[in-house]
Amino acid sequence: MAGIYFHVPFCKQRCIYCDFFSSVTVRLKDSYVDSMCQELSKRQNYLEGQKIGTIYFGGGTPSLLSPSDFEKIFDALSVFSFQPDMEITLEANPDDLSETYLDALRMLPFNRISLGVQSFHDRELQFLRRRHDAAAAVRAVKRCQQKGFGNISIDLMYGLPPQTLPSWKQSIEQALALDVPHISAYHLTYEEGTPLMRLMQKKRWQAQPEETSLAMFEHLIHRLSDTGYEHYEISNFARAGYQSRHNSAYWNGTPYLGIGASAHSFDGKSRQWNMKSLDYSNQSVQREILSETDRYNDFIITRLRTMRGIDLQEMQRLFGAEQVQRCLQQAQSQITNHFLEHTDHHLRLTQQGIFISDSILLELISIQDGVA
Ligand code: SF4
């Protein structure tokens, strides 16, 4: 199985924290859609005939594309062969999901909607410079459900400077009340060059203390686990059968083709990426052949993010028995301290380990010198 990702780099306005590649002018949208269609044709052999199991439109704001843009893209996709039960996701801004737009989406092959909600508090949304308010987010989810989209994901953010533990708890309760089968929750990150970073440097706002962020994360995990969501990846929670198949494929090392500006592709041996430009199709594709060390580090980073953890038998098949022994030695102190557990040929984060996953990952990939 393989996946296809489309990057749609248009936004009506820039969120304060965002460092993704996107443009606030849609003047070049039509030619950009044409470029993506041509790229599909040019790169139809990239996945070596593997059947496509997942398609994901991310951004940017893919819900700024019109139904006829999507028709063109789905037509251009016909050069690939597909699995019968594909997952096809559209990332959407709540403000874009009008009745008419959703009716049109229902006529297209989409079967999953991922909504960038971030918070159910207007003050927090204004801080983030999101263009929707909390009421619009609630309306959008309900409208998707009324139109028959059962597979809905909501993105939330925590650790926001104006957020409090009670306001975070309320956002989670509102998400639960909407009864969506998938919730992703990310801690706010401070990226160089963003307006948020400048505000912080001017000391207009202060970052949340680490204990508050941890308390927010802890509450998230307990509350969602108590209400039947499986915590299947550090930032992702799903009811049975609703894990994101596209993202899970990334974490399992499945090949994917990335179409559009700044989109990355992976074929198991190398990574490729397009330039960050609306005119990307006239610029060269960058390529990096992965060394064994790169592949090993990718293996550790992607697998350990998931609650299934690292399959040591798979590691042995890919990197040899000696490497498994080295990895286990490296992990020993974290196993002793109950941050990692080693059971059933798997090495995985424990509940406590999830909170320090970044430092555990760093420790495990630091053995890279030992990989040929
Ligand atoms: S909508 Fe998404 S891509 Fe666009 S600015 Fe906001 S966070 Fe960035």
Image (tube, rainbow, N blue to C red):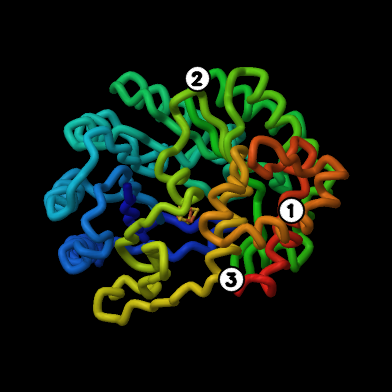
Which mark identifies residue 293? 3
Locate residue 48, reporting x and y percent.
24, 60
Which mark identifies residue 353? none
Task: Verify CB contact (< 8 Å) between mark 3 and mark 1.
Answer: no
According to the picture, the residue beneath numbered tag 2 turns out to be 179
Along the horizontal axis of the image, is 24 left or right of 225? Answer: left
Task: Please report the residue visible at 15 percent of the width from the left and 64 percent of the height from the top.
Answer: 41
Task: Please report the residue visible at 22 percent of the width from the left and 35 percent of the height from the top.
Answer: 84
Q: Nearer the viewer, residue 191 or 56?
A: 56
Q: Nearer the viewer, residue 48 or 280?
A: 48
Q: CA distance from mark 3 to mark 2?
A: 43 Å
Secondary element type, mark 2: loop
Locate residue 18, reporting x and y percent.
54, 59
Q: Nearer the viewer, residue 226 or 79?
A: 79
Tell which circle, 2 or 1, labels the residue nearer the N-terminal end: 2
According to the picture, the residue beneath numbered tag 1 turns out to be 328
Type of residue at label 1? Leu
- Nearest to the eye among marks 3 and 2: give it: 3
Locate residue 179, reporting x and y percent.
50, 19
Q: CA distance from mark 3 to mark 1?
A: 17 Å
Tell which circle, 3 or 1, labels the residue nearer the N-terminal end: 3
Tell which circle, 3 or 2, labels the residue nearer the N-terminal end: 2
